[in-house]
Image (cartoon, rainbow, N blue to C red):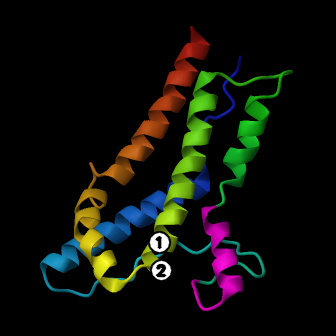
Amino acid sequence: MAQKTTALDFTLESLINHLVESKKTASENRGTNGAIPHLRPPLQPQPRTEGAWDGSLLDEKDMTAISEVFDLYEARESLKEAFDPKSPGNSSDSVLLPEQIYFAQQAERAYRARTSNTFVRSLAHLAGREVSQGGEKGTLKQSLNYFSSIIRQGAEKEES
């Protein structure tokens, strides 16, 4: 069985890297009494399609369009291919692809919760997340390492 997945989903990787940078900046600025940027996911990678989310949260259309930012189309398509009986993927595909999709779904739920919670509740959770997510050894960066290790393990099994 040949491995179908040889790289992380581009959308997920750019989402995680964007969040790491945002958290790092916020954590550094909070310690120096600097301005804290509003945390939001990155806008759709270029080139942007017409009607893509522009960062607004003003109406129902915007709240629907935000799902595109978290949509891992490539990972979903690769997952379908990995379970094709004529040309199945290997075990790393069956672990990595759903994990990437779940991670993006959790990020979307977390973002929607942060934008709809009360100020006090949001602030209660903020400081700990910034410290743990903004570092090189933080949870977000570790997830990239975890996904990459699954890809490597799948490739190693193929060679032997």
Residue density around tag 1, few if under 14, some if 14–19, many if 20 or more, within 10 Å:
few
Residue for point 56% across, 48% down: 102
Name the residue beneath numbered marker 2. Answer: 116
| Image location of residue 6, percent across then percent down | 61, 35
| Image location of residue 60, percent across then percent down | 68, 85
Picture layout, residue 39 above or below residue 12: below
Q: Secondary structure at mark 2?
A: helix
Q: Is residue 74 magenta?
A: no
In 3D space, how far apart are the residues under numbered discs 2 and 1 (Cα atoms)?
5 Å
The kind of residue tagged 1 is Ala
**Residues rendered magenta in the picture:** 55-70
Residue for point 86% across, 21% down: 86
Name the residue beneath numbered marker 1. Answer: 113
Residue for point 65% across, 90% down: 59
Q: Secondary structure at mark 1?
A: helix
Type of secondary structure dominating the magenta stretch: helix
Question: Which quarter of the figure has residue 72?
Answer: bottom right
